[in-house]
Amino acid sequence: MMNTAPIQRDLVLVGGGHATIQVLRSFGMNPIEGVRVTLITDVLKAPYSGMLPGFVEGIWSEDNIMFDLAALSAFAGARLIHSAITHIDVEEKIVILQSAAPVSYDIISVNTGAVPDTSNIAGAQEHALRVKPIAGFLHNLPKIDKITDDLAIIGAGAAGSELALALRARMTASAQRPNIHLIGRAANVLPRHPSAVSRIMKQALDKANITSHLGSAVRVIDKQAVTLENGAVIPAEICLMVTAARPADWVSGLPVARDERGFLAVTSRLHLPDRPDFFAAGDIASVIGYEREKAGVFAVRAGPVLVHNLRAALTGKSFISWRPQKRYLALIGLANGQALAVRGSLVSSGAMWLRLKHWIDKRFMDKFTDLPLMQVAPPRTLPALQNSDTTASHADNNRLPEIYCAGCGSKAEAGLLSAALKDACQTALLLGANPAYFPPEDIFSDAADMPPARKKGSLIQSVDYLSQAVSDPFLFGRIAALHAMSDILVAGAQPLSALGLVMTERAIPDVQQRDLSQMLAGALVELSAHHCQLSGGHTVSATQAGLGFSITGERISSSRLPTTNDEVTLILTKPLGIGIILAAQMRGRAPAEALEGAYLAMATSNAPVTAVIGACRVAAMTDVTGFGLARHALNLAARCGFSGVHLTLDDIPLLAGAAELSASGIASSLRDGNMRAVPEQHIAPDLAPEKTALLFDPQTSGGVLAAIPSTDAEPVIAALARLEGSLAVRIGRFTSVSGLTLS
């Protein structure tokens, strides 16, 4: 459900683990008015660990076991920030990120999981593959599939043993018969379980011809072998680590309570003992007095408690406690249609337990894949947030106004703007931006001085504005700046200065400052990279955030336009589909891979390709943006004196998932208008309509469409191909036939 009330509190979720997804679902079903949710994650799809062995064996597909964090975030109305975390400043309440601006929080919840502990094994970092994070293991699975001789698995607990059996079943199905070695320091497999459990698992391993090496720890791992403390040398093409877990490195730098293994120590209410604003659940956390092994079941069962207590922390309600049980039903796969059931001293095995495991796993997954309609309940009002004095950030100077004024009364406060600009410059500087292009000291003057032209070329101007297209304000700032500068670049000009028009979402001043700082930081990173100074601008408070720029540039090159005497080749430098993917995201239906591709395309500058094309000296360029490829191509043709464009549909690159989304009936709101703007269409009848529709899809920060005489096209394409990450595809030509011809 969309939460449109002024923002008063920020709930930040770090990591997309099994507890976090329950929080996202809860806030999608029942949002709290005035609370904004943000998910920070380094992956857009997160696996359900309980289904990993089944996937490895071939029972489940990858889609079956993955939580789509992008879709869940959209369902929850949450901001999605795709970045790894480097630190949390618990005093200033700021999350420091690897590839994005810092994110401030009022309440934070960490659910990032754990990684295998390789600290005592020489060579493990260089020569072993970790099973956790699971996303990394899935990436490496094709390597494992190519093993011909020996595979070593270090860790003979439940996870390692289950994985060994699943891999044997997988390899048998593909006619692979490598030797699989299971290595454990304890004298038995599954040493934390009753002896009967160990015996049944050992029998299953022996039956699968998996060699167990028990009773000795690993000393060294190299490229070809694993050496144990007892001197045994085990050959291994690949070594998998499924050892005891440890927290990620950034956790060690936090000045907070941790257990003896370094995990965050939380109370039974799932928050740090002295910090009721800092919650943690799953493998990253240990409940004080109730230390348990790291198992997915605890993250799942912690979820409802975490949901309740996060809501309580935001609303001033009472917390509840959770005591992780010692006795619980553990279902451990034995592959080949069998599973092992363990509860305390009760042990059983057979096909019925695998069926039960599959039923439990599937029921859990369905809660997050078959999401209900978003308008299921009205948002909870929360008067307690208004003028709350429970934290320093909600003092008198952070009260919401009784009304929101229009006109100049809707501007950001001077002090807020000044602080946001200072923060933005600091962030941009840390991310490598050149301070020479930061705002001047007199940026608050009513008029801005432009930097002088560098080459005495003619000045050109352009203006562009975007409503917030992505929920990450830093990424949005980058995209908005790139989108605006692209018009200058395709004109053969160098951006000189920018005036910004910023719309911030209605919120208390602290939140407005955070958002403004992040958007401007993203913009400054890209403006400075293009030697363009932010010279001034204007702010407005509105119901939806947005950012635009008026760019002044200096024309530094001029190419002769192709004429009707030339045979003209059309070249496109980015795939299509950004508009439809963003439209799908608004509906919570954009696959994670599609979103990732769209984000990458939008955040890629057109400067390198325009420099190469401009050097051709016979070229016409435009960027493909709101009007869609078809209309922009016809506009370009008219500039060169041609009446029409011929495009070859199969040659036009598309973003992953775009055609499928189009076939499902999703479209940008501007698509049909773009179609009507091309009245003459000659489309071959056998073409796929879901692909032809994408010719009218509006692109945000789209690619360059270049018209080049065919005799000059090949060297230009070759030069573009040498650019890192560049795409340059022939897609058609200019014609004398009026309108769009598509074959």
Image (cartoon, rainbow, N blue to C red):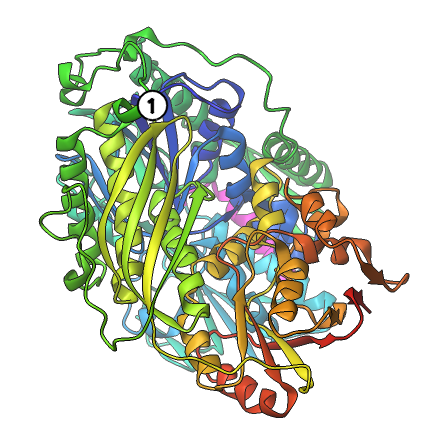
| SS majority, magenta | helix
| Quadrant of res 283 | top left
Q: Amino acid at mark 1?
A: Ile
| Left or right, 219 with reference to 128 | left
Image quadrant containing the C terminus: bottom right
Name the one closer to the observer, 561 or 441.
561
Q: Quadrant of residue 689?
A: bottom right
Which region of the structure is painted magenta?
Answer: 192-207
**Residue 61 in picture, x, y percent from top left:** 67, 52
Query: Residue at position x 15%, y 32% from top?
Result: 414
Question: In the figure, is residue 696 to the left or right of 314?
Answer: right
Farthest right residue? 685
Asked if 503 appears above or below 222 in the picture, the reply is above
User: Could you tell me which secondary element the residue under label 1 belongs to?
Assistant: loop
Q: Nearer the viewer, residue 347 or 86?
A: 86
180 drawn magenta: no
The picture places residue 406, in percent across and down from the top left corner, at 33, 21
| Residue placed most toward the observer, 193 or 266 | 266
Q: Quadrant of residue 503?
A: top left
- Judge whether residue 608 can be spotted in this image: yes
Of the pair 558 and 276, the residue shown nearer to us: 558
The picture places residue 368, in percent across and down from the top left corner, at: 58, 33
Identify which residue is drawn at 73% across, 55% down: 678
* Image: 8 above or below 436: above
Is 205 inside the magenta-drawn segment? yes
Q: Crowding near pointer 1: few (<14 within 10 Å), some, many (20+)?
A: many
**Which residue lies most toward the left here?**
441
Locate residue 673 relative to residue 70 in the image: left or right.
right
| Residue at x 14%, y 45% (from the top left corner) | 422
Height in image: 247 above or below 164?
above
